[in-house]
Amino acid sequence: AQKITQTQPGMFVQEKEAVTLDCTYDTSDPSYGLFWYKQPSSGEMIFLIYQGSYDQQNATEGRYSLNFQKARKSANLVISASQLGDSAMYFCAMRASYGGATNKLIFGTGTLLAVQP
Amino acid sequence: EAQVTQNPRYLITVTGKKLTVTCSQNMNHEYMSWYRQDPGLGLRQIYYSMNVEVTDKGDVPEGYKVSRKEKRNFPLILESPSPNQTSLYFCASRTLTTGAEAFFGQGTRLTVV
């Protein structure tokens, strides 16, 4: 079964520090993609970063980087130099079965990050 | 501006009264889908569509209907809403390209009393 697990329901981090949000996944598909989305209190879903299963290097987008460890099936999000505006819910998601019929995103339960001044 | 537009943003309705949540995208995306978000469960897919007139069930389709008569529109229909359908609903669209991100609408917060 395909599954995303986020074991941290909530986290605190001091402003300007780095924080790592954990994500592990389970799939038997050799080809898959991993995504992180941010959901601020206003509710919208904002795409942050993507990592393909065959990508050799870890993805980076500005202050966001994805620590992809394929053997461990983990795809942790690292936010460097946290800002107050980073306070939000963060979702890890996976899309497997690229050639299949579903192409759906499977989401974890989310991690609520609070950045403290 | 590329966007997915859902309406309404907020809706309170009574049990059994049919309702439709509209979704429209302006990016010519083939793939569109509906998710519901519930506390502690993340987002779960309700229905999806690979193209016009092609729709299929996701993980939690019971109590919902969809249609895809035009590429840009993908309405979600609740024929007889019940309180357990109180949730935050998202419409999303993307291309079928490998690795394509999904663009989400602003969300519709539905309360069924």
Image (spheres, coloured by chain):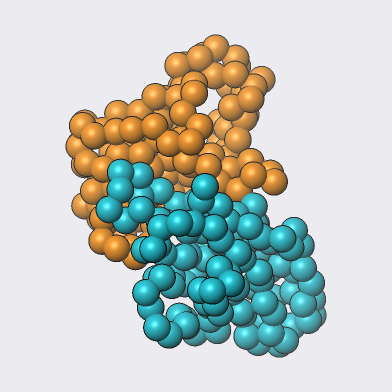
In this view, the residue in front, A33 or A20, is A33
Among the chains, which one is cyan? A
In this view, the residue in front, A74 or B69, is A74
Residue at left offset 49%, top offset 21% = B63
Horizontal side of residue A77 vs B91, given as left or right: right
Q: Is residue B62 above or below residue A44?
A: above
Residue at left offset 49%, top offset 23% = B62
Residue at left offset 52%, top offset 47% = A1
Q: Position of residue A93 (x, y in %)?
A: 51, 58
Q: Position of residue B28 (x, y in %)?
A: 21, 52
Residue at left offset 60%, top offset 14% = B15
Q: Quadrant of residue A78?
A: bottom right
Any part of residue A88 in sight: yes
In this view, the residue in front, B71 or A28, is A28
Among the chains, which one is orange? B
Q: Is residue B66 above or below residue B32?
A: above
